[in-house]
Image (spheres, coloured by chain):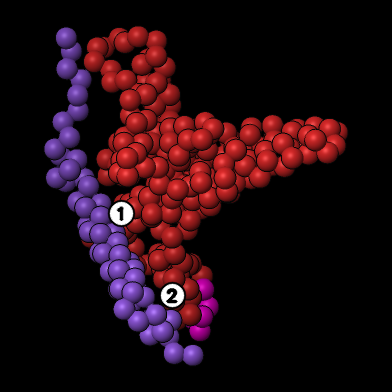
Amino acid sequence: MNENLFTPFTIPMMLGIPITTLIIMFPTMLFPTPNQLINNRMITIQQWLTKLTSKQLMNTHNPKGQTWSLMFISLFLFITSTNLLGMLPHSFTPTAQLSMNLGMAIPLWAGTVVMGFRNKTKISLAHLLPLGTPTFLIPMLVMIETISLFIQPLALAVRLTANITAGHLLLHLIGSATLALVNISLFTALITFTILTLLTILEFAVTLIQAYVFTLLVSLYLQDNT
Amino acid sequence: MLQIWVPRKPYYVHVYQEIWGGMGLMGFIVYKVKSAGTRSNALKVLSPESAHGHH
């Protein structure tokens, strides 16, 4: 399919200019804007799905946290649409690049932490120590909780990158293995083809789940801090 | 025709203040990483042995 395994992850260029920005802006064209009270079926379905997702995601927050609902829904829609578009063969997935996911994770996580420290300083500092720890363990536990706090954006970014990249890579490898096995042994090729089908189904699930997990975790960090 | 656009200004001005701060932090990290990369590339061009450290 491609000359080596790295080609799906290289920055796509057109006449020497990287067109990553255009690719990132493309999924917005697939979500038409509602400009009437009652729209056509496509927009109504999207509105219904958006309402369902936003209710599910935001009903555990207080009103201050619910001001972030626009941000969460846009984030969720963006990650879902870019991941799903990346399932098309030979397409480029922006969310497979660590730089992009770090660019999404660091501002959002830092926003929740800063919000916590600004509005509820004592409570957000108190989150650094779990309830009911023995007295002599307190200094060590505070250090451990601080480290785990600073790891949160890295974990968010790397989780999404690794899941998407690993899924794409596995599909490539098993696909090329199936192709190579067709001439050698048809039965083994059929087994690998079955594995490929199952993996593709898993990949579609992963794209949705990863978007959900990213958004959910950021909303959890927000909940702690509002 | 019904106008159902939500005004975005209060979001950018009030709600996302901390996110702008987070974006500043991200820009700072990007600047640090990029400058370190440029510095190591420049060192590689100038003197390959000093770029790889003294063994």
Label 2: few (<14), some (14–19) or many (≥20) C-alpha neighbours in 10 Å: some
Q: Amino acid at mark 2?
A: Val
> Relative to residue A134, is residue A192 drawn left or right?
right
Tell me what residue is drawn at x 17 percent, y 35 percent. Answer: B8
The residue pinned by badge 2 equals: A142
Residue range corresponding to the magenta coloring: A133-137
Seen from the viewer's position, the closer of residues A181 and A162 is A181
* Chain identifier of the red chain: A
Residue A146: % across, % down: 41, 71
Do dots 2 and 1 share one subunit? Answer: yes
> Relative to residue A224, is residue A83 drawn left or right?
right
Q: Is residue B17 above or below residue A150?
A: above
Label 1 marks a residue whose chain is A
The residue pinned by badge 1 equals: A107
Q: Colour in which chain B is shown?
A: purple
Tell me what residue is drawn at x 45 percent, y 48 percent. Answer: A10
- Do we see residue A57 in this rendering? no
Tell me what residue is drawn at x 37 percent, y 24 percent. Answer: A30
> Relative to residue B7, is residue A136 drawn left or right?
right
Q: Amino acid at mark 1?
A: Pro
